[in-house]
Image (cartoon, helix red, strand yellow):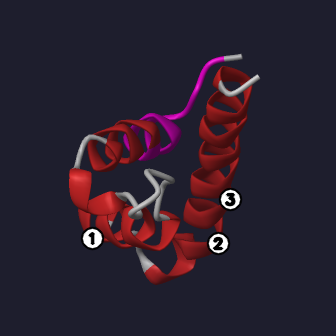
């Protein structure tokens, strides 16, 4: 399944945000509120695209969290 341009943009932006130390809590867990803010400012979705934006963001965040959990096993 090919990813859309919007999905690729969200993945790229989340990956960029995860590279910033300020987007992590003191216990090194991801502060998803900060990542969300960075990604939202970067993507700047139109009002009618916000629901789709968050669907893509949440889907990729779940993939990241699953990867983090798998590393801890």
User: Residue shown at 62%/18% (left/top)?
Assistant: 2
User: Residue shown at 30%/50% (left/top)?
Assistant: 17
Q: Can you identify the residue that label 1 sits on?
A: 41
User: Residue shown at 65%/28% (left/top)?
Assistant: 67
Q: What is the number of callouts on the image?
A: 3
Q: Can you identify the residue that label 2 sits on?
A: 51
Residue 23 locus on image (x, y percent)? 33, 60
Disc marking residue 14: none
Disc 1 is placed on an element classified as helix
- In the image: residue 69, left or right of residue 27: right
Disc 2 is placed on an element classified as helix
- In the image: residue 22, left or right of residue 15: left
Residue 37 locus on image (x, y percent)? 36, 73
Q: Distance between the Cα atoms at labels 1 and 3?
A: 16 Å
Density class for disc 3 (Cα within 10 Å; few <14, some 14-19, many ≥20) is few
* Residue stretch rendered in magenta on the structure: 2-10
Residue 33 locus on image (x, y percent)? 47, 73
Q: Is residue 66 above or below residue 18?
A: above
Density class for disc 2 (Cα within 10 Å; few <14, some 14-19, many ≥20) is few
Circles 2 and 1, Cβ within 8 Å, touching? The answer is no
Disc 3 is placed on an element classified as helix
Q: Is residue 19 above or below residue 57?
A: above
68 in the magenta segment: no
Density class for disc 1 (Cα within 10 Å; few <14, some 14-19, many ≥20) is few
First in sequence: mark 1 vs mark 3: 1
- Nearest to viewer (mark 2 / mark 1): 1
Disc marking residue 55: 3
Q: Is residue 32 above or below residue 4?
A: below
| Quadrant holding the C terminus | top right
Q: Distance between the Cα atoms at labels 2 and 1?
A: 15 Å
């Amino acid at each position: 399944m090919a990813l859309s341009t919007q999905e690729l943009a969200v993945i790229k932006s989340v990956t960029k945000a995860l590279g910033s130390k300020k987007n992590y809590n003191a216990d090194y867990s991801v502060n998803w509120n900060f990542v969300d803010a960075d990604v939202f400012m970067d993507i700047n979705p139109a009002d009618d695209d916000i629901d789709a934006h968050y669907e893509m963001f949440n889907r990729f965040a779940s993939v990241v969290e699953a990867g983090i959990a798998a590393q801890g096993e």
